[in-house]
Amino acid sequence: MLTFKGRQVAKPPSPISSELPAYQRLFCLEPPPLLPRYAKSGMYDTAFSCEDDVIEKLGLSRLYANREEIDGCNVFWSKRTK
């Protein structure tokens, strides 16, 4: 474990992460350019986004069976089987 700004983190923050909104910096551990590929591959058990264009681009509604909107953001879970 490493310490970053007084918090324990699993790996050092990416320099790219400073370009993301604060809520995404908390949870995004992969470099943003690779995220669409990983999400579309079904690598993640859950996903979330507060941006409709990201949800559409990644096809999250097609990848996950369940969706819940919470405070303007969408949480997806239960990967669909192919």
Image (tube, rainbow, N blue to C red):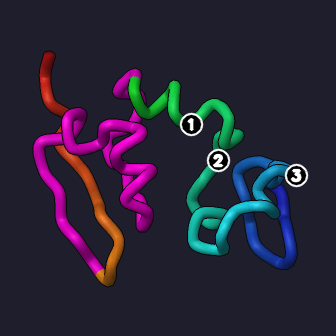
Local crowd size for mark 3, using a 10 Å CA cut-off: few (<14), some (14–19), many (≥20): few
Q: Position of residue 75 (x, y in %)?
A: 29, 60
Residue at image mark 2: 29
What residue appears at the point 41 percent right and 60 percent down from the top-left corner? 49
Q: Is residue 81 above or below residue 60?
A: above
Q: What's under tag 2, amino acid-wise?
A: Leu
Does the magenta-highlighted stretch encompass residue 54? yes
Q: Earlier in the sequence, mark 3 or mark 1?
A: 3
Does the magenta-highlighted stretch encompass residue 26? no
Q: Earlier in the sequence, mark 3 or mark 2?
A: 3
Q: Secondary structure at mark 2?
A: loop
Residue at image mark 3: 15
What residue appears at the point 33 percent right and 78 percent down from the top-left corner? 72
Q: Position of residue 19 (x, y in %)?
A: 78, 61
Q: Position of residue 50 (x, y in %)?
A: 42, 67
Magenta highlight range: 41-70
In front: 82, or 13?
Answer: 82
Give me the C-alpha separation between circle 3 and circle 2. Answer: 11 Å
Quadrant in which the C terminus appears:
top left
Q: Position of residue 21 (x, y in %)?
A: 65, 70
Residue at image mark 1: 35
What residue appears at the point 57 percent right and 59 percent down from the top-left corner? 27
Q: What's under tag 3, amino acid-wise?
A: Pro
Q: Is residue 45 left or right of residue 58?
A: left
Local crowd size for mark 1, using a 10 Å CA cut-off: few (<14), some (14–19), many (≥20): some
